[in-house]
Amino acid sequence: MTWGQLTKNSLLHTLVYLTVLLLTITIPLPIKFHNLTVILFLVLFSFALIQKSIFSHKWELREVNTLILLHFIVIASGMIYTTNIENGLDELERAIYPIALIPIFSLLQTTNITDQKLLKFFSISCIVLTIYGFIYTWGVLDKKAFLQILFHGHKSFTAHIFLQPLYLSVYFLLIIFFLLETLRTNGKSLSIRPRVIIVVVIFFAISMICFLRSKTALLLLPTLLIIYLVIVLKKRGWWVAFILLLVTLLTFLLDKDGTPDFINTYGRTVSKAFDQRLMIWQGAIEGIKQAPLFGAGTGDTQVLLNEGYAKIGYEEGISNNYNAHNQYLQFMARNGLVELLCFLAILSYSFWKSSKQSNYTFLMFNMLVALVMLTESFLSVQKGIAFFYFFLMVFNYLPEKKQDHKQI
């Protein structure tokens, strides 16, 4: 390899390194900053391709890449029978994001970055964004508005940082388990100061989840903590605990009066959809019955859902264009059983991969996303897509350490 080729490759890898750091930091920020970073990388990648500086890189097609590409093909195929091309193109554009991550992370393997380092940057970004939110409400708004926000929390706070309460709560849930795992695996080697900082940040994250008052997050916090304790104490019994708590959570969700009183009285939602979830799910299922195998097509999901709402007389769902508030039903409504199976293959592979690692952050991430998708169409908006697929690639491509991984 010539000095010129070495310089080009080193420059490209540096750009990839910086790109991923920017992607990590911008996940909590308005999505336009995150997307701009992806576009910037693709431009640089195209330029490097023209300059032939990436041909010396050893490329490999991993299982997760194959599954992501297959899912994209299904979404693209849904454009064939859709009647709403404009909406379909919007959804197809969002589906390109995971594809764009493949060359980024393939090149990133040549750097010394780890998933722990990216999770640290992500945690710092979430904390800084939250602090900015409090500074803004205290310094810009009048005292009455500031006290109202402190009292109500939820979207009255997150509206000023352009983020829904659920998403910020999900971010903090991941941060909690990342830090708990840091204490469990590295606690003995850490000095008192970093251990104190970690404990403070964990309590800060829990406080923020309580402050944001998202009903879904308030349900998930104790559920995931119980599962995590079982994983740490029982190791191989984690899947039993996960299934049992999943059934318990579904029981709560399927009973309109089953949600704990504290969640109902203290928790908040952006719309009435969480409280009317049974009507929404019933309407979604009625719509899916019309095209169970291939769905309505990419772009026509809402049309099919509204037809289902009309069948059961749920006018509020039609007037508000409620999505399915369940990502699994949302996939069924869009491209039927075919798309649902494609996504379940991605999720199953991710669970299998995480079960082989001695660090449980990846496993808790999978459980977090799998559970939050029971009440939210989490991957129907760019925020959810960016969060899930970015960290899916992080955990699949970047090891926590250069260490042997033991199976749980």
Image (tube, rainbow, N blue to C red):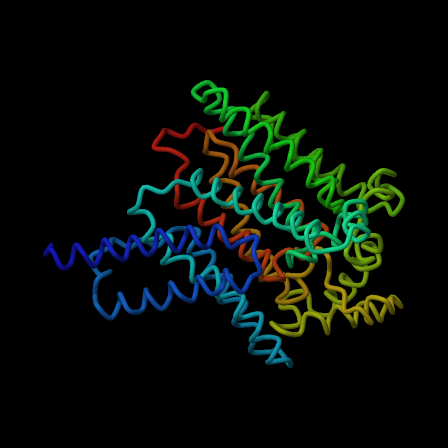
- Say which quadrant the N terminus sits in: bottom left
Horizontal and vertical percent position of residue 43: 36, 68
Horizontal and vertical percent position of residue 160: 68, 57
**In the picture shown, does residue 148 fall above or below 85?**
above
Horizontal and vertical percent position of residue 140: 69, 55
Horizontal and vertical percent position of residue 130: 62, 47
**In the picture shown, does residue 191 fall above or below 310?**
above
Query: At 58% from the left edge and 70% from the top edge, which residue is drawn?
Result: 91
Residue sitting nearer the eye, 304 or 27: 27
Q: Is residue 280 left or right of residue 377?
A: right
**In the picture shown, does residue 321 fall above or below 254?**
below
Query: At 49% from the left edge and 22% from the top edge, which residue is drawn?
Result: 187
Q: Which image quarter: residue 305?
A: bottom right
Q: Is residue 202 left or right of residue 211?
A: left
Q: Is residue 102 left or right of residue 212?
A: left
Q: How many marks?
A: 0
Query: At 44% from the left edge and 62% from the top edge, which residue is drawn?
Result: 37
**In the picture shown, does residue 337 fall above or below 398?**
below
Q: Is residue 268 left or right of residue 28?
A: right
Residue sitting nearer the eye, 374 or 46: 46
Residue sitting nearer the eye, 195 or 258: 195
Q: Residue furthest left?
A: 2
